[in-house]
Amino acid sequence: MRLLTHNMLINPMKGMEGAFPLKLFPTKVTKEEVKFNSAFIVNLLPKIDYKALQYAATTVGIKDLPSELPKKIDQEEHDALLKKLHHILLEVHVEEGKLVCPKSSREFTIKQGIPNMRLNEDEV
């Protein structure tokens, strides 16, 4: 599971609106190189919850993100930052671990990089 995916996931149970981000407990993290495209990252950033991304990055050992993103990101001026965000969003993979809802404490396992978000019958 890429950290980009984590940034978009929510607990699918009814009544769990606002329970974001899911807590991330990785047990196996890998890195896979992906071709850098600064325009893609710039266009992706408005869709990202940056505080949730900072949290997820910290859980996988990346602690040097700026506290806030610049108001306007220029591809040339902010090249180093865009490369770091590219790495965090697309190259870091959580292969094993779990996600935990901060509201219900419901756990969702991550196996082979895939988060299992299926609910039990009594949770639907």
Image (spheres, grey):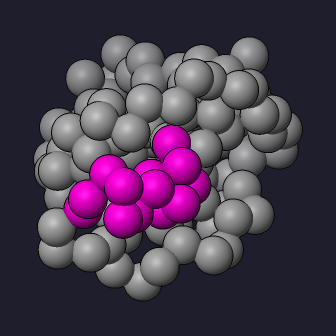
In this view, the residue farthest toward the front is 76
Seen at 43% across and 18% down, the residue is 118
Q: Nearer the viewer, residue 122 or 119?
A: 119
Q: Which residues are magenta?
A: 73-86
Q: Is residue 74 left or right of residue 22?
A: left
Is residue 117 one of those drawn in magenta? no
Seen at 80% across and 34% down, the residue is 30
x, y percentage for residue 59? 67, 62
For the N terminus, which image quadrant? top right
Seen at 31% across and 32% down, the residue is 40
In this view, the residue farthest toward the bottom is 67
Answer yes or no: is residue 19 visible: no
Answer yes or no: is residue 116 visible: yes
Marker count (numbered): 0
Q: Nearer the viewer, residue 76 or 26?
A: 76
The quadrant in which residue 58 appears is bottom right
x, y percentage for residue 10? 31, 41
In the rendered image, the vertical position of residue 29 relative to residue 34, given as above or below:
below
x, y percentage for residue 106? 48, 46
Q: Is residue 37 left or right of residue 73?
A: right
For the C terminus, which image quadrant? top left
Seen at 54% across and 49% down, the residue is 83
Q: Is residue 32 left or right of residue 73?
A: right
The quadrant in which residue 63 appears is bottom right
